[in-house]
Amino acid sequence: MATDAGLEFSVHPLVLLNIADHFNRDRLQNPDQSSGIVHGALLGVQTGRHVEIVTSFTVTLSSPSDADAVATGLVLPAADFAERLEQYKAVFPEYDFLGWYSTTPHAPTAAELALHRQFMPFNELPLYARLDPLTLATGARAAAAGGAEGAAAAQAPLPFLLYETTLEANTGEHRLAMVPVRVETGEAERIAVDSVARGEGMNEGPDGALVAHLTSQRNSLDMLNMRVKTLLAYMEAVESGKISGDPALLRQISAVASQLPTISGSQFNQQLAKEYNDWLLTLYLAVLTKSTHITSDIVDRHIDLGSAGGDDRFGRMGSGGGGGAAHHRAIRKRYGMGAGGGSGGMF
């Protein structure tokens, strides 16, 4: 990546949400051990002189094992990090590794620069992003309090700072120089971030956004129905000769009507008839199955009552106690039922 001053940098809201979520998860899951500082990688694209940070993922650092990492007390697991980058490249081949981020509350020091060098094998001049969650939380509380301080906090810049890697002209040492960055959002991201910020979709009441959206849709349909009726009344009046038609208006009505999908063609009628017949067949099979089960239950009750009463009529089918069983089989054979009392014989 070039280090010319003419580069333009932008970040998407997803990156900011990922970093904030990473910070909150680390603080809530490890309240006693969390230092409040988390790290991760930045992915994005560079088109000409425009560098766009699109997404990010978390990076777990380990304890130092060489002299280069003693200053930070942290070491980047290069093998695991390279494997993670390959996995992201397989899913997002257009994204490149642009740099890394942390949530340190202070400007870059020798510790951050030492850790910064460990990312250089993956990008010769990586970016370094810093999100100060303490400043962000203070601004959020001030904005929620309202008043003059709240208005000032709402207009304050986002505490997301970006640094690029430069070289000292005299010593050739690497240093981190702050560069301006702007938040770039698409329409889908704007809607998603707005929904997350307002907590939409969770236990919405009568005044929720979903209810408001559906109400707006219903009002739009009512207005459309009213206007269609007005046009229909106008066309009927023109056709009956009550009023003279306006050619320009008639052409506009014809253009609108021609854009509507037709539902009176032969293909539509065939599809409608097919679906209607399928529905009738399903209903017929359901009624037939229910009738078969009812018939089977009546036959079983008739046989049980006859066997319990010892009626001589059941003995005519055979001798002794076998007459009832023979009569049972005869009734089931007549109604086309199996011997188990079910309705499998009919189907």
Image (cartoon, rainbow, N blue to C red):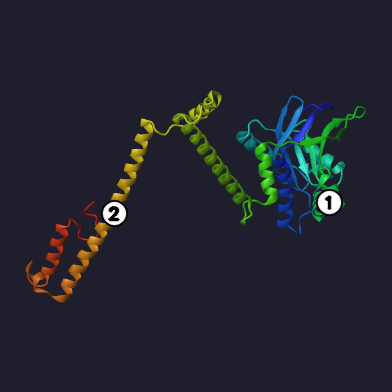
Badge 1 marks a residue whose secondary structure is helix
Image spot of residue 63 (x, y percent): 77, 48
- Residue 116's place in the image compared with 294, above or below, is above
Counting labels gives 2
Image spot of residue 216 (x, y percent): 60, 46
- Residue at the location (66% across, 42% down)? 191
Q: Amino acid at mark 1?
A: Gly
- Residue at the location (86% across, 51% down)? 149
Q: Which residue is mark 2?
A: 287
Label 2, label 1: how far apart the Cα atoms are: 68 Å
Q: Quadrant of residue 340?
A: bottom left
Alpha-carbon neighbours of circle 1 within 10 Å: few (<14), some, or many (≥20)?
some
Q: Is 266 left or right of 49, judged from the image as shown?
A: left
Q: Taking the image as drawn, is residue 277 in sight?
A: yes
Q: Taking the image as drawn, is residue 122 in sight?
A: no
Q: Which residue is mark 1?
A: 150
Image spot of residue 341 (x, y percent): 23, 62
CB-based contact (under 8 Å), mark 2 and mark 1: no
Alpha-carbon neighbours of circle 2 within 10 Å: few (<14), some, or many (≥20)?
few
- Residue at the location (72% across, 41% down)? 13
Residue 331's disc number: none
Mark closest to the chain's N terminus, 2 or 1: 1
The outermost residue toward the bottom is 309
Q: Is 289 left or right of 212, judged from the image as shown?
A: left
Image spot of residue 88 (x, y percent): 64, 37
- Between 340 and 274, which is closer to the camera in this rendering? 274
Badge 2 marks a residue whose secondary structure is helix
Q: Amino acid at mark 2?
A: Val
Q: Quadrant of residue 15?
A: top right
Q: Quadrant of residue 71?
A: top right
- Between 60 and 20, which is closer to the camera in this rendering? 20
